[in-house]
Image (cartoon, rainbow, N blue to C red):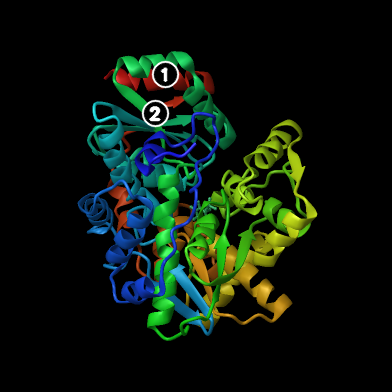
Amino acid sequence: MALDSAKVIAQGISKEGGLFVPESFPAISDEMFEKLIGMTYKERAAAILSLYLTDFTEAEILHCVNGAYTGTFENEDPAPLVEVKTGMHLLELWHGPTCAFKDMALQLLPYLLTTSAGKTAPEKTMVILVATSGDTGKAALDGFADVEKTKIIVFFPQEGVSPMQKLQMTTQTGNNVAVCAIHGNFDDAQTGVKNIFADESMKEFLAGADMEFSSANSINFGRLVPQVVYYVSAYCDLLKNGTLKKGEGFNVTVPTGNFGNILAAVYAKKMGVPIKKFICASNKNNILTDFIRTGTYDRNRAFYTTTSPSMDILISSNLERLLYHLYDNDTAAVSGLMDQLKKNGKYSISSDVLAKLQSEFYGGFCDDTATRETIRKHFKENNYLCDTHTGVAVNVYEQYVAETGDNTPCVIASTASPYKFAAAVLDAVKDENEAMPDNEFDMVERLSAITGTKIPAPLATLKDKTVLHKTCVHKEEMSGFIRDFLKK
Ligand SMILES: *Cc1c(COP(=O)(O)O)cnc(C)c1O
């Protein structure tokens, strides 16, 4: 069913439980690219968003973009492109308030959501429910804190997030925020949230209070559009700095978990950005590598905890959207595959669809040891410090070049500040026989001393903040926690 963008964003997920996808992709004309090249990031974002959000006025779009990207990121340009060595361009997406790439979308989503809700259900308060393995929770809290007509509730696994990530969440201020740990792992938190979304008595309770659930997860289309912008913008920067001439293409490498970030690159290509290869990088949880190489997606396998936790995932939700496009919008074929995934934990795509996939995608992975070596090597050789997720991407990019000899310029999504994963990054760059400090803040200090890089302000000030959220509940108590908070 076709819906206006305001409805799609406010609702988050379709009534049937499927994911929203655009009916067709707006094309960026040559003339528009010429204009985009001369624009700032915010101007580019407004121009691209207006192609999708056709039911928003120009003033509404400017309000959203300016609110999201003014004074919130370290630099005027929220997504700088850094050439680390010839052909290798790192797109740094982590200069926002929580030091990971999810800020790019989650600073903008509250504006899109409240503007959408203002059009579709102005009297309602939106209740954003999030289950997080770390980065999404904090980015959503920061984006939604004290936003009128919204409340945000974040659940995280007590033992499943890094000390830095936990402190980022438990010190969050704001009158409309609740943060709660749960006994269990990320899957428990995620399943709990999914059940609450579907719970009829909870829906009645919300309706009685003039409230409505929405999602800040990357299944919400409002999360994807802001991510399309930075790929278009990176292409404009490559044209502007002379790396590419008009008509020349480039590759992208993306460290992938839920498949949201790399899907945004696919959408950018559908709009006319000349991306040749999508290099999909995974850690030891290499289910996507296997899928791209064999055409079989099989989640019946061991789950590993790695130094790149935001990619420790066995079900990449947004892959469903890619399948839909690969199957030429055949919804029945895609729901067939999703049913098999639910029932048997696996599915295989047909050989012609696999050929289509492989013509555009390369899949690769590396383990923690290789990630560590990559971080160390690039710091020594290029004086560039990257985090563990970005380290995985750089490693897989280098595997790709070694295997194919393809030296096309490549944009690598750099998804987190190295300071956010200080333990693993420090371990990679410090002298072999130097002992590790025993707490996270000392590691951060040491990392800065060794590398001569600056500690991002949001992490530097964390040490002095007060822990405000101390509740930890069992899975069965999540809905009670929500009701208590919403009654306040
Ligand atoms: C979320 C995240 C990823 C994975 O992005 P997806 O869109 O889920 O594929 C990679 N790196 C970091 C640092 C993240 O926070």
Q: Residue at x 36, y 57 (%)?
A: 51
Q: Which mark is residue 366?
A: none
Q: Residue at x 28, y 53 (%)?
A: 68
Image coordinates of residue 370 in percent, x first then y, are: 66, 66
Horizontal placement of 391 versus 213: left or right?
Answer: right
Residue at numbered disc 1: 203
Q: Secondary structure at mark 1?
A: helix
Q: Using residue 146 as the reference point, say whether residue 262 is left or right of it.
A: right
Residue drawn where x is 58% and y is 65% of the image: 393
Q: If the image is split into quadrants, where does the C terminus sit? A: top left
Q: Nearer the viewer, residue 309 or 29?
A: 29
Q: Position of residue 154 (x, y in %)?
A: 41, 34
Q: Quadrant of residue 447?
A: bottom left
Q: Which residue is mark 2?
A: 213
Q: Position of residue 441 (x, y in %)?
A: 40, 55
Image quadrant in which you'd find residue 208: top left
Amino acid at dot 2: Phe
Above or below residue 385? Residue 143 is: above
The percent position of residue 386, horizontal first and vertical second, equals: 49, 68
Label 2 crowd bin: few (<14), some (14–19), many (20+), radius 10 Å: many
Image quadrant assignment for residue 185? top right
Q: Earlier in the sequence, mark 1 or mark 2?
A: 1
Q: Is residue 74 visible?
A: no
Q: Is residue 35 left or right of residue 25?
A: left
Q: CA distance from mark 1 to mark 2?
A: 8 Å
Residue 359 versus residue 468: which sits nearer the camera?
359
Q: Residues within 10 Å of mark 1 (few under 14, many from 20)?
A: some
Residue 233 in sight from this viewpoint: yes
**Does residue 366 appear to the left or right of 484 in the view shown?**
right
**Which amino acid type is marked by label 1?**
Lys
Q: Are marks 1 and 2 in contact (CB under 8 Å)?
A: yes
